[in-house]
Amino acid sequence: MSLINYLTRIHFADGVLEHAVQAEIAAHEISRPMIVTDRGLVETGLVDRLVHALPRGVVHVMFSDTPANPTEDAAIQASRFYIENECDSIIAMGGGSALDLGKAAGLLASHGGELASYAAIEGGVKRIRPVIPPLIAIPTTAGTGSEVGRAAVIVLSDGRKLGFISEYMIPRVAICDPTLTLTLPPLLTAGTGMDALTHCIETYCATAYNPPADGIAMDGLRRAAANIERAVEKGSDINARREMMAAAMNGALAFQKGLGGVHAMSHALGGLPGYHLHHGTLNSVLLPHILDFNAPAVAHKYSQLKQAMNLPEKADIAEAVFSLGKRLGLPSTLGGMGVDLAGINAAAPLAEKDHTNSTNPRRASAGDYLEIMQKAL
């Protein structure tokens, strides 16, 4: 059975932040939210826009210690901060890390226990109950789409980067305001944009049957392919920023269908201690290789992907994705990101166990993933 479920409430417009924040705080009767963000975003002044939009009488507290890759330790700290300050809701503002940390903090604050027990691969989906505090998600990048997703990806204390998945973890509200991305630096725009593009491609190729997800993914891919280079080259172009935010949203609305081998590997590599790897950039490096690996099982879908990317029918889609990443200024190899042989040896068995591996269109073992990563090295 394939479950198809689209229930996320989304505000999407240029400059919608202030109006949407006030409307949703009133609608959810929020009086003491915990804002989850990161120090870098606080320094940009964007968080001030959120704080100034809070209605009179709403008293907030702020947790700004979100790490680049959200960790179990940070989730525990944030959940304790939430409880100690008697908060009634969470407003997560930032990139995917802040949004995922907000989800994990709400999960721990309402459920207690060990975070690992709620991981999908540990049978945790059934343990997550509808008691998580209201979450308003405000993305300031256009990549993960976590603002409309039902999952959080967290690096556990044992080094595993695992997915926590439940319909109860979908934010009550997403506020997508493209003006929040106008000052995003070029390389971060490129890396997060390739994350969105990867979501659309992997979802379309995933094994589950979900026609709405396929349609949404193809629409997102068209938007991403047409606008990612413009968004990187001229960050002040609001039209390109809007289209990339829409592509990121579409990718995440679609990936409830499932992802695949790119994310199995990027999750495994992203959790390795000492490497500090950017998720979207990992996806950019790995996507061409998984397209080649999956071709025997799913090449019949590549024609539609090429059409969406405005590529000639005879184009090699893996080569086209590889070339796109290079034009965007991103690393083209894992070695260029600082990954070594020890890293891929450690990541390969973790990739096989990752929850996204189950919907990869071609069965992949730890040995397969090791070989793919060796080619990407």
Image (cartoon, rainbow, N blue to C red):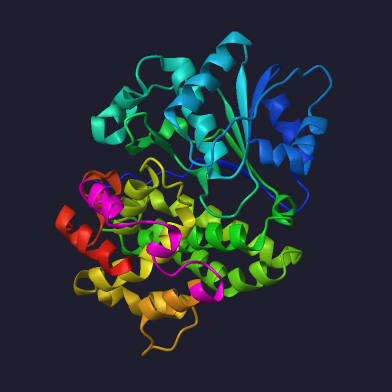
Query: Relative to 70, is 373 above or below?
Result: below
**Residue 175's quadrant in the figure?**
top right
Query: In the figure, is residue 135 to the left or right of 355?
Result: right
Q: Give the magenta range.
A: 326-349
Is residue 229 part of the magenta span, yes or no? no
How many badges with numbers are in the image?
0
Residue situated in front as seen by the camera: 108 or 218: 108
Q: x and y percent of residue 249 in the render?
A: 54, 53
Q: In this rendering, does residue 82 appear at all?
A: yes
**Residue 26's quadrant in the figure?**
top right
Residue depicted at x 37% and y 56%:
339
Query: In the figure, is residue 367 to the left or right of 260?
Result: left
Q: x and y percent of residue 375 in the render?
A: 27, 69
Q: In this rendering, does residue 365 appear at all?
A: no
Is residue 334 part of the magenta span, yes or no? yes
Query: Relative to 224, is 61 above or below?
Result: above
Residue depicted at x 45% and y 52%:
279
Residue depicted at x 61% and y 57%:
245
Q: Quadrant of the C terminus?
A: bottom left
Query: In the figure, is residue 77 to the left or right of 186?
Result: left
Residue situated in front as seen by the camera: 21 or 317: 317
